[in-house]
Image (cartoon, helix red, strand yellow):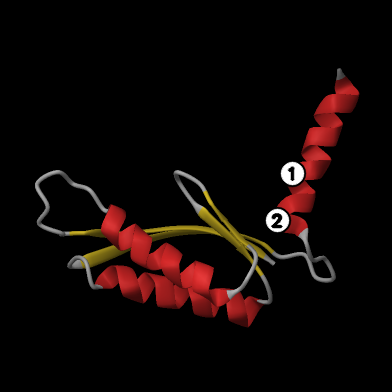
Amino acid sequence: MLVAFSVAPSGTGRSDGSVHDAVAAAVRIVRESGLPHRTTSMFTEIEGEWDEVFDVVKRATDAVGDFGSRVSLVLKADIRPGFTGELDAKVERLEAAIENDG
């Protein structure tokens, strides 16, 4: 399965509203998990089996909770049994379709 998630604290008390320290704590957990992943400016994508992916998401969410009084979690999942390597393969199929269209 692929999961795209974004997790951020609120109630941090920071005057600039920045949450980069909290997000860094979450991304560190994703990277240390050893699962295939990608981080962009808005989401982190992670690939693996249901239990291992959601364990990482939970631990990342818990880590962000240390930075504020509340946590916001946005999550989207693509559950496609029998497929692996889709973190890159989906993008490769898209790029090929764009190339073949032109």
Given residues 70 and 67, the one toward you in this image is 67
| Residue that badge 1 annotates | 91
When asked about the image quadrant of residue 64, the answer is bottom left
Residue at x 10%, y 57% (from the top left corner)? 13
Residue 90: x and y in percent read 76, 48
**Extreme residue in the top direction:** 102
Residue at x 12%, y 52% (from the top left corner)? 14
Q: Look at label 2 and name its amino acid.
A: Leu
Q: Are marks 2 and 1 in contact (CB under 8 Å)?
A: yes
Residue 47: x and y in percent read 66, 66
As drawn, the label of residue 87 is 2
Considering the numbered disc 2 on the image, is that residue within a helix, a strand or a loop?
Answer: helix
Residue 44: x and y in percent read 51, 56
Q: Look at label 1 and name its amino acid.
A: Val
Given residues 4 and 20, the one toward you in this image is 20
When asked about the image quadrant of residue 74, the answer is bottom left
